[in-house]
Amino acid sequence: MSEDIILSTSGLTKEFAGFTAVNGVDLKVRRGSIHALIGPNGAGKTTCFNLLTKFLPLTRGQIVYNGRDISREKPAEIARLGLVRSFQISAVFPQLSVKTNVRVALQRKRGDSFDFWRSEKVLSSLDREALALVDAVGLSAFAELPAGELSYGRKRALEIATTLALEPEMLLLDEPMAGMGREDIERIEALIRKVSKDRTILMVEHNLSVVASLCDRITVLARGQVLAEGDYATVSKDPRVVEAYIGSGVGHGH
Ligand SMILES: Nc1ncnc2c1ncn2[C@@H]1O[C@H](COP(=O)(O)OP(=O)(O)OP(=O)(O)O)[C@@H](O)[C@H]1O
């Protein structure tokens, strides 16, 4: 049976002045899955992520999204194709309300001339859409609050709302739980699960218990290469994975 692959890489490689941070990575992300990229410190996760989001140019290899070679595309171009990095726009304006932040993201998506937005009718329909997104990420009670006054975890939820405003087909999340306490982690985990219903998600995540409960498929990187791939139960038992984490000294996910 052929798998429905939304994003794939072949021979993905990144060299920095003689040092190979990502070395011939072949990745296949299934449509509709929540896929995690994990690995010990310095494994190449962030570099790999930055290659996928086009924040870094590749040295060699190929990235294919929905059958289209995006190896040389710009971040804005792949966003238009539906492949969006969360926090890419990182447009949380602290003085603006939560709702207005989302509305600004919706306006960006439309990208029309400024005059267009002066129409009351357009503005109120955008407001309704913004409120629906605010509600979807569980921030209804804070809609009128300046974004700067949100807790850390709720700010990340707002960032997810502004990302969803771009109507991504696939979301790339860079350590969505970084710096969060348990309560916020649970909230963002539930949110990711919810927004994954009709989307594909690829995330770099250090918190292994989050990965275990949230992700269908995991790729373990070590020294720039794919060490193992599979579901959490499989990869976490793989002796090479155990060794890579132990060998790296301080592990992640505690
Ligand atoms: N701009 C750069 N120039 C030179 N070396 C780099 C650069 N960016 C990353 N590296 C190196 O590439 C390797 C992989 O780094 P990367 O940040 O991708 O790993 P990581 O798996 O995300 O690590 P961590 O878990 O610590 O965030 C590291 O050895 C790092 O020092």
Image (cartoon, rainbow, N blue to C red):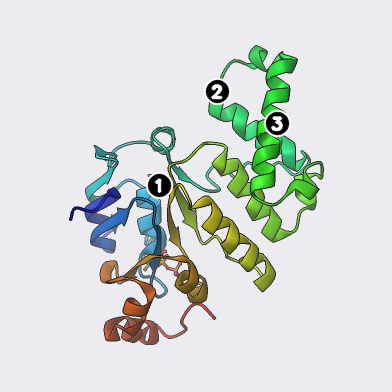
Image point (32%, 54%), residue name: 30
Question: What kind of residue is marked 1?
Answer: Thr
Pick the residue in front: 110 or 94: 110
Q: Residue 181's spot in the image, x, y percent?
A: 67, 71
Image point (52%, 48%), residue name: 86
Q: Residue 165's spot in the image, x, y percent?
A: 57, 37
The quadrant where ligand 1 appears is: bottom left
Task: State the image quarter where residue 89 is shown.
Answer: top right
Quick one: label 3, few (<14), some, or many (20+) residues within 10 Å?
Answer: few
Quick one: label 2, few (<14), some, or many (20+) residues within 10 Å?
Answer: few
User: CA gap, disc 3 to disc 2?
Assistant: 18 Å
The answer to whether mark 3 is within 8 Å of ligand 1 is: no
Question: What kind of residue is marked 2?
Answer: Gly
Identify the mark at residue 111; answer none if there is no mark: 2
Pointer 3 or 2: first along the chain: 2
Residue occupied by mark 1: 53
Q: Residue 129's spot in the image, x, y percent?
A: 65, 32
Please indicate, yes or no, whether residue 131 appears anywhere in the rendered image: yes
Above/below status of 7 relative to 105: below
Q: Quadrant of the N terminus?
A: bottom left
Pick the residue in front: 155 or 168: 168
Pointer 2 or 1: first along the chain: 1
The answer to whether mark 1 is within 8 Å of ligand 1 is: no
Determine whether label 2 and label 1 are within 8 Å by CB: no
Label 3 SS: helix
Residue occupied by mark 3: 128
Above/below status of 175 relative to 107: below
Looking at the rendered image, the disc whose residue lies closer to the viewer, 3 or 2, is: 3
Taking the image as shown, residue 71 lies to the left or right of residue 125, namely: left
User: CA gap, disc 2 to disc 1?
Assistant: 21 Å
Pointer 1 or 3: first along the chain: 1
